[in-house]
Amino acid sequence: MSDLNKLGLAEARDALRKGETTSVELTEACLKAIDAADALNAFVHKTPEIALERAKAADERIKAGDAPAMCGLPIGIKDLFCTKGVPSQAASRILEGFKPEYESTVSQQLADAGAVMLGKLNMDEFAMGSSNETSVYGNAVSPWRRGNDDAQLTPGGSSGGSAAAVAADLCLAATGTDTGGSIRQPAAFTGITGIKPTYGRCSRWGIVAFASSLDQAGPMTKNVRDAAIMLEAMCGHDPKDSTSADIPVPNFEAMLTGDIKGKKIGIPKEYRMDGMPAEIEKLWADGAEMLRDAGAEIVDISLPHTKYALPAYYVIAPAEASSNLARYDGVRYGRRAQLAQGDGITEMYEKTRAEGFGHEVQRRVMVGTYVLSAGFYDAYYNRARKVRTLIKKDFEDVFAAGVDAILTPATPSAAFGLGEMTEADPVQMYLNDVFTVTVNLAGLPGISVPAGLDKQGLPLGLQLIGRPWEEGDLLNTAYALEAAAGFVAKPGKWW
């Protein structure tokens, strides 16, 4: 078989089971593609030795007939996941040289299932960003181009390296994390599928924390079936994570029937933003029509507190970040600043954090510390928490009224050029999360499915939001949408 790196998880799994290829051959094809794609800056720590060792072990398991669905499949791991003996920096200078002595629960579960780790993927520093431009490794670059324009585009953020790697066929799939849209927005920008499961469905243990009540790991894949396969391997109760839910994990792939007759799909009026590009508006309307044609009932719904979601998110997330990032002080691990004669521990903290954290991280830590300070705690943080409760109740009311899933755009635009937002107000960048943050605030599952191209030939995605713990049903609705949209576009290879 040629072009093995272009296979999806399901295709590769079936080929392995039939003996048409081996995990070693699959892995070597991906490693070759990775080495030829340094221009994308997607893989920042390559692990070919680990990959080939795991591939050989996977081939033995497959021969022995003891092979879970992910066995032998080469994937990338976002740099936010701690991986034993492999640099795990969260794309930050402050964690330079940090090689954990332990494995995150999610990456361990994937390893136990026989998945092959090809290396660590680029991301925004501490997952703070929407364009993968805050990384200590430099920008990740999208494999897509606007028409004949050579301008480099963002693959989205914070899981930009994961999105670029999957879209460019450097790996069969990748892990991502989503705090306010960091799986779904890059998936939409690069024409792939990304699902954020219900909060608590995947363990957060061993994943470097940004905002603990919002962070959730999920798969980034080439299609919905692959997302179902990988998500099942990533899920499960973990006693090491107090927020991990002890709920059985279904066979998500078996739930992909494509039959959504009688399902009620809500269209929230509050997501119709002023100035929304006509292309996004049309894509949304087309998506609703596709689901109607597949037998679903389309209903208008209201989520009245949506307009407060972005401000509430940008109070809660920085507040939790300022608390979580207090541990990076140059004492126990990672980088420590050079000290001058007579410097004490306070100077060490100050210098280490000043040179270790990038500007976006510093901005969010300062905002978070401000909203948690004694005089402002009630005015900002407590009020944001109350708004969050109202946003969650909006969704609960809609689901209680019989709605099965909610259809919205995934992003307010197609991918923009790297550097194009440099001079913009930071709030302009934050608006990239306008359709996605509500899902994190309410702890719900959400999936982005590629559904069309804009006039410049760039991918556009649609988002489906599901009921809590019903990822199987959500994936099935996404599967029906994917089939109707028939998105098959791939980036032209320029790198």
Image: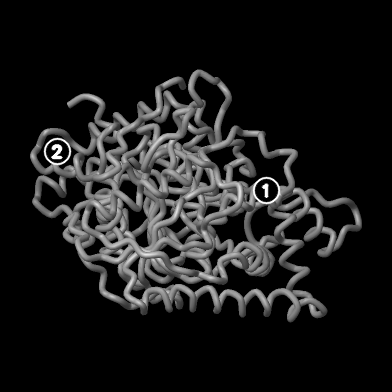
Tell me which numbered mark, 1 or 2, is placed earlier along the sequence.
2
Judge whether 285 appears above or below 370 on screen.
Answer: above
Q: Residue furthest right?
A: 342
Residue assigned mark 1: 428
Horizontal side, residue 43 vs residue 374: left or right: left
> Dot 1: what SS?
helix
Q: Quadrant of the N terminus?
A: top left
Horizontal side, residue 438 vs residue 426: left or right: left
Task: Identify the colour scheme used.
Answer: one colour
Q: Nearer the viewer, residue 330 or 180?
A: 180
Identify which amino acid the numbered label 2 is placed on.
Answer: Ala
Identify which amino acid the numbered label 1 is placed on.
Answer: Gln
Q: Nearer the viewer, residue 270 or 416?
A: 270
Judge whether 222 appears above or below 271 on screen.
Answer: above
Q: Residue, x 73% and y 42% (percent of image)?
A: 424
Q: Residue, x 42% and y 37% (percent of image)?
A: 165
The circle drawn on residue 15 is: 2
Q: Residue, x 9% and y 37% (percent of image)?
A: 19
Give the percent coordinates (x, y) of residue 448.
40, 51
Q: Nearer the viewer, residue 21 or 129?
A: 129
Q: Label 2 crowding class (10 Å Cα cut-off): few <14, some 14-19, many 20+?
A: some
Horizontal side, residue 163 vs residue 433: left or right: left
Q: Residue, x 90% and y 53% (percent of image)?
A: 341
Give the percent coordinates (x, y) of residue 136.
63, 42
Judge whether 45 appears above or below 230 on screen.
Answer: above
